[in-house]
């Protein structure tokens, strides 16, 4: 079985460029010029599913994995520390965001993303607290479905969501909830 890996990203933290590499055992930052390891934070994920791209949010880095859940790190020039993480390593009994493929979107202190059974969720970025959850964008019958997904693309004050059922959805995602504007089956 081939593992899934997130591509490396270069982010600037505190004026220092850091090459972020997330693999199934840890999250690492290297100096992109020299290859020197700046820091490494253990984060072992089941089935090697480190697929969604880590998202930078100020001096924080957000990661999410299908089986092991989410983790928010505070990143300094030469070290990282865990701010919060999922309390449950479960694909079914989730407390934050357990995404398998879609990369979440972070905006104005909130995280929007799709969880393990198709739940489109909004979390508070500073605590991981779940604000709301909806199945409207991912499942036609409103029932949870393992690996149900939708990819989120921000455009102006709205999102385009492309789900695996062939629907292209235009919606707003705010802390107040999911509000669909239109949908077309492609």
Image (spheres, rainbow, N blue to C red):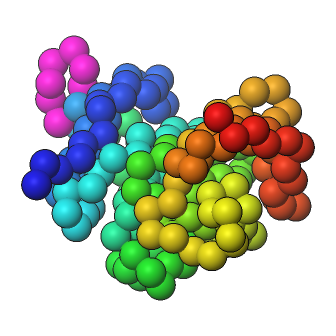
Q: Residue at x 46, y 32 (%)?
A: 13
Pick the front one: 70 or 30: 70
> Quick check: 151 above or below 15?
below
Query: Horizontal and vertical percent for residue 111?
Result: 64, 53
Instruction: Let me know if residue 37 appears in the view.
Output: yes
Q: Quadrant of residue 154?
A: top right
Residue 19 figure quarter: top left
Q: Is residue 37 above or below residue 61?
A: above
Q: Nearer the viewer, residue 52 or 72?
A: 52
Residue 60 visible (yes or no): no
- Residue in the picture at 26% in, 38% down: 21
Give x and y (percent) for residue 7. 30, 32
Q: For the C terminus, give its image quadrant.
A: top right
Q: Position of residue 160 (x, y in %)?
A: 71, 35
Magenta segment boundaries in residue numbering = 31-37
Is 48 colored magenta in this rendering?
no
Residue furthest front in the image: 186
**Which residue is found at the position 63% from the left and 76% from the top?**
143
State which quarter of the image contains the N terminus.
bottom left
């Amino acid at each position: 079985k081939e593992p899934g890996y997130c591509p490396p990203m270069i982010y600037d933290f505190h004026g220092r460029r850091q090459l972020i590499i997330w693999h199934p055992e840890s999250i690492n930052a290297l100096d992109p010029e020299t290859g020197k390891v700046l820091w490494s934070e253990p984060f072992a994920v089941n089935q090697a599913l480190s697929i969604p791209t880590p998202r930078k949010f100020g001096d924080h880095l957000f990661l999410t994995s299908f089986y092991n859940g989410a983790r928010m790190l505070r990143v300094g020039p030469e070290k990282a520390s865990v701010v919060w993480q999922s309390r449950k390593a479960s694909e079914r009994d989730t407390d934050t965001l357990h995404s398998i493929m879609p990369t979440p979107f972070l905006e104005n202190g909130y995280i929007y993303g799709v969880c393990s059974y198709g739940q489109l969720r909004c979390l508070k970025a500073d605590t991981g607290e779940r604000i709301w959850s909806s199945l409207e964008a991912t499942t036609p019958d409103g029932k949870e479905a393992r690996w149900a997904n939708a990819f989120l693309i921000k455009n102006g004050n709205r999102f385009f969501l492309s789900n695996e059922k062939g629907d292209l959805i235009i919606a707003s995602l705010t802390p107040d909830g999911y509000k669909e504007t239109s949908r077309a089956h492609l």
